[in-house]
């Protein structure tokens, strides 16, 4: 069913393009013939004098922790979507004394789409009621560069899905949990790990090693077996491992993080006296 | 140990002195190892010391069976020091499997004594007619109506027991025609907590149970009988003092359709019988009565079994043979949901909707060598499959066994030979056998099953090799007039012995558990049982029966296996004067010398307990009134046996009285 949803618009587009005149502007796509966003919900729109950026997420909300975005740029005058945009973006948190950004991926075009662009951000803190976070865009299309920005709501996560910690090397890190549907059994676990190079710059860490120890505090800190420590995957620039969940409920994922020299820089082993690591994320299902 | 040897020797001398005498020789027959007759007398199940006793209490009277207790209800039978995992326990040849992952519902708990005619206990490979087993088989033969043309009849039973305020009520209504019969009975038991010796109340030892059984039969031809049986058994509010939770509901529906055809001839096929059956069990564990628990749990389990068999019996020349082709399909499912304040419920699959499909054929031939001796050959071959149907359950087990396969096929073989000689008042039995069994649902596919006996969580292992047993047994009985003396011994060497072994790397799930055990195959284990038994007429109407049993179990390091009885003794004086009967019973165990802390065992002390009962049979015209009263544990001894989980003491002094009226 899902594939049909994609196949129909694609077939339709091919048909349309095949029948269209050669002198049509290939970068302008008329409305209602565009890539499907049916599986997404509009979170907000950001406008300037010329364009409107439609910001989509899976559920129409922007969440603390990992949020995957889909963007599309509309020409206000022609009501058409633009397919050759070079986006860059910076989410900014305005705090009383300073401001900072968060880890993001660069904005890339969705494969096989006409005018859809995607990126993720890992909001290390919440910012509700339009207070705090602003999305700032700078983009180029047709040789011209534009700006757009808007304050957004970042909804607090009910379970801890991002951990900000100071390494023993004095570097600040952000570990994010990429959401996935959890089930009883062995689950794929995907994490993002960035270091805070400056207030506005967050760089992907590629050479650190992570250990994982899932625990169930309500069941006497029950653990599981055959977990796979997350390792860096160059294609996605994320850390991928496996977590075994023996039952539904609330689990803590306890991590240690070591640098390229195998020196422990954060987190701790779980013992009777330390039931939780200082680098910890949560799962509940 | 030395004491035992000398007792055996002493009894041995005693034995030989008697054996000098020679007497008639009876026709050789292969005996069952033990039959507990319940309903064959005209007055059902009243021949025993305590007529309305539970089935468990009856089973415990067998020399070969001991009962593992987790409470006052649903005891688990063991035979040759082996638990139900290694036994084939059937109801009238029907396979039925408990639905509790913690073995709180041995299938003996789903029938009532009032349903049964007799218990057929076969040791070792002689007990594999209906399924493969190592230790033997217990078949509970159901009581059926007869075509005797007596018309309507019935009975009412009432019983009361002081300890535990136990009330038993039963009623039976029969119609026995010439070509048709109908038989219905119901039994209700209601027990409060019992007191151990010294008036110590054992909390959570109460239970309520009712049982309804209907059996109806039609004589379809001169030689054919078609009958149907339906049993509904439900227990509620069953306390388990040795466990952290109780049972709010344990119910079974057992149904079967049976056709038997007998031929009036001396040779050839003498009879055939076929049966189709279905049974389903629901077992719901519940801890709502227990105070101050950090975790509340719901643990339901379901087990349904479909099955059929076709049995032929025949005789040709010196051969008496039997063939039984049978199959069953079992579905076992269990889950657990845990509730902790402030947390979302935690759910896990403990039995993965496992389907077990078994198709087997059993054959038996008794070859009469001559008037006094015979050879019995038995053999069984079966194809046994397991399939995991529940996806979540499969994924759960995959955590422990990556690459796990959903289905498994096994072939199971067993065979045995037994020689019997009857001569000069002696019966000699010598047998050797080889048997195999597949791991059961919990051993193969259990997921975090908590065992409060050793305080470990257990994880199944679907890769377990078949358990293989080599068995030798010997029995001799001297019988003359009413005197008998016998000695019996059996030894088992079991290869790839399945047992839980601690896996230090795994983390327990149950709060307070010591750790996790994974079912593993030991290279081998040895089991040995020996007993001496005798019946002596002392005086007119006065008899003495006694037995002494020694059991030994060791793993491949020589360490004790769990739940092996210390030396146990039973004695019974019975006196009958006209319609008045008197019985005085003594039961004793020595201190447990061999026990294994790794299996959660602690030493149990020896004990001696005494029971006394009296009965009177009152006959008014053609109607019978039967009275029986007695005292159990006369001296209110506080005692516990090796088989009592968490050493929960057994019942203290108790007076009981039964009245039965038959019309």
Image (cartoon, grey):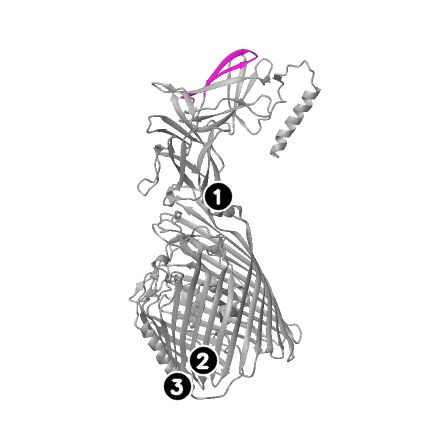
**Residue annotated with mark 3:** B17
CA gap, disc 3 and disc 2: 14 Å
Estimate the x, y position of residue B594 in percent, counting from the top left: 34, 65
Q: Is residue B29 above or below residue A71?
A: below
Label 3 sits on a secondary structure element that is helix
Query: Between residues B222 and B594, which one lies in front from this camera angle?
Result: B594
Query: Between residues B504 and B190, which one lies in front from this camera angle?
Result: B504
Left or right, residue B122 beside residue B651: right
Quadrant in the picture for residue A6: top right
State the residue at coordinates (34%, 63%): B595
Q: Quadrant of the N terminus of chain B?
A: bottom left
Q: Nearer the viewer, mark 1 or mark 2?
A: 2
Quadrant in the picture for residue A5: top right
| Chain of the residue where label 2 is placed in the rendered structure | B
Q: Is residue B171 above or below residue B246?
A: below
**Residue annotated with mark 1:** A185
| Chain of the residue where label 3 is placed in the rendered structure | B
Disc assigned to residue B477:
2
Residue A134 inside the magenta-drawn segment? yes
Q: Which residues are magenta?
A: A130-151
């Amino acid at each position: 069913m899902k594939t049909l949803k994609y196949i129909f618009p694609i077939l339709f587009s091919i048909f349309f393009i095949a029948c269209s005149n050669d002198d049509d502007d290939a970068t302008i796509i008329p409305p209602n013939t565009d890539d499907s966003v049916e599986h997404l919900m509009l979170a907000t729109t950001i406008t300037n004098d010329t364009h409107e950026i439609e910001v989509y997420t899976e559920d129409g909300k922007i969440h603390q922790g990992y949020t995957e975005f889909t963007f599309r740029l509309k020409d206000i005058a022609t009501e058409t979507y633009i397919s050759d945009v070079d986006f860059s973006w910076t989410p900014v948190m305005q705090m009383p004394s300073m401001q900072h950004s968060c880890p993001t991926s660069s904005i890339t075009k969705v494969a096989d789409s006409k005018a859809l662009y995607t990126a993720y951000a890992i909001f290390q803190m919440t910012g509700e009621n339009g207070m705090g976070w602003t999305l700032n865009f700078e983009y180029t299309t047709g040789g011209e560069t534009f700006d757009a920005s808007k304050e957004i709501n970042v909804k607090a996560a009910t379970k801890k899905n991002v951990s900000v910690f100071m390494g023993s090397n004095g570097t600040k890190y952000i570990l994010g949990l990429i959401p996935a549907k959890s089930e009883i059994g062995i689950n794929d676990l995907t994490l993002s790990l960035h270091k805070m190079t400056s207030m506005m710059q967050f760089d992907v860490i590629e050479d650190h090693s992570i250990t994982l120890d899932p625990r169930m505090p309500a069941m006497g800190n029950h653990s599981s077996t055959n977990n796979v420590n997350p390792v860096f995957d160059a294609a996605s620039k994320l850390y991928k491992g496996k977590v075994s969940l023996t039952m539904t409920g609330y689990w803590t994922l306890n991590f240690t993080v070591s640098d390229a020299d195998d020196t422990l820089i954060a987190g701790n082993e779980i013992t009777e006296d330390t039931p939780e690591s200082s680098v910890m994320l949560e799962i509940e299902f | 140990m030395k004491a035992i040897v000398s007792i055996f020797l002493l009894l041995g001398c005693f034995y030989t002195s008697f054996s000098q005498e020679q007497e008639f020789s009876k026709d050789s027959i292969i005996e069952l190892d033990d039959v507990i007759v319940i309903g064959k007398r005209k007055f059902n199940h009243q021949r025993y010391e305590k007529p309305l006793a539970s089935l468990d209490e009856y089973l415990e009277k067998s020399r070969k069976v001991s009962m593992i207790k987790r409470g006052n209800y649903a005891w688990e039978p063991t035979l040759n020091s082996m638990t139900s995992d290694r036994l084939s326990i059937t109801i009238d040849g029907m396979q039925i499997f408990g639905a509790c992952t913690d073995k709180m519902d041995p299938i003996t708990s789903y029938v009532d004594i009032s349903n049964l005619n007799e218990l057929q206990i076969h040791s070792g490979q002689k007990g594999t007619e209906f399924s493969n087993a190592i230790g033997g088989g217990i078949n509970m033969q159901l009581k059926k109506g007869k075509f005797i043309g007596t018309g309507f009849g019935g009975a009412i039973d009432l019983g009361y027991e002081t300890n535990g305020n136990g009330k038993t009520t039963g009623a039976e209504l029969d119609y026995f025609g010439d070509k048709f019969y109908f038989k219905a009975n119901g039994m209700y038991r209601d027990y409060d907590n019992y007191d151990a010796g010294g008036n110590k109340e054992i909390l959570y030892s109460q239970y309520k149970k009712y049982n309804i059984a209907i059996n109806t039969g039609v004589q379809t031809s001169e030689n054919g009988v078609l009958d149907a049986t339906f049993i509904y058994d439900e227990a509620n509010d069953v306390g388990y003092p040795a466990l952290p939770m109780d049972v709010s509901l344990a119910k079974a529906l057992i149904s079967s359709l049976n056709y038997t055809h007998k031929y009036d001839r001396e040779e050839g096929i003498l009879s055939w019988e076929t049966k189709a059956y279905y049974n389903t069990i629901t077992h719901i564990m519940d801890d709502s009565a227990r105070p101050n628990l950090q975790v509340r749990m719901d643990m339901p389990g379901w087990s349904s079994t479909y099955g059929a068999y076709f049995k032929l019996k025949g005789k040709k020349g010196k051969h008496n043979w039997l063939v039984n082709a049978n199959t069953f399909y079992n579905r076992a499912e269990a889950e657990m949901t845990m509730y902790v304040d402030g947390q979302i419920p935690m759910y896990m699959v403990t039995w993965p909707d496992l389907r077990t499909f078994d198709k087997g054929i059993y054959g038996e031939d008794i070859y009469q060598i001559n008037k006094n001796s015979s050879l019995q050959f038995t053999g069984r071959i079966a194809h046994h499959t397991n399939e995991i149907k529940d996806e979540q359950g499969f994924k759960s087990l995959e955590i422990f066994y990556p690459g796990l396969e959903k289905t498994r096929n096994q072939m199971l073989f067993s065979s045995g030979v037994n020689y019997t000689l009857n001569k000069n008042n002696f019966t000699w039995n010598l047998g050797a056998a080889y048997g195999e069994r597949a791991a059961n649902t919990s051993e193969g596919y259990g997921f975090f099953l908590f065992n409060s006996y050793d305080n470990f969580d257990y994880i199944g292992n679907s890769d377990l090799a078949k358990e293989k047993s080599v068995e030798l047994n010997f029995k001799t009985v001297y019988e003359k007039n009413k005197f008998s003396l016998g000695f019996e011994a059996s030894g088992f060497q079991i290869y790839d012995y399945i047992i839980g072994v601690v896996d230090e790397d795994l983390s327990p799930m149950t709060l307070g558990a010591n750790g996790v055990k994974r079912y593993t195959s030991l290279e081998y284990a040895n089991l040995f049982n020996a007993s001496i038994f005798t019946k002596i007429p002392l005086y007119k109407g006065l008899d003495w029966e006694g037995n002494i049993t020694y059991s030994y179990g060791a793993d491949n390091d020589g360490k004790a296996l769990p739940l092996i009885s210390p030396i146990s003794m039973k004695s019974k004086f019975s006196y009958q004067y006209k319609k008045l009967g008197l019985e005085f019973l003594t039961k004793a165990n020595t201190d447990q010398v061999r026990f294994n802390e790794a299996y959660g065992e602690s030493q149990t002390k020896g004990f001696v307990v005494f029971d006394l009962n009296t009965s009177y049979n009152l006959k008014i015209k053609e109607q019978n009134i039967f009275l029986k009263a007695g005292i159990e544990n006369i001296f209110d001894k506080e005692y516990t046996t090796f088989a009592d989980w968490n050493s929960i003491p057994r019942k203290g002094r108790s007076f009981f009285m039964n009245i039965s009226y038959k019309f």
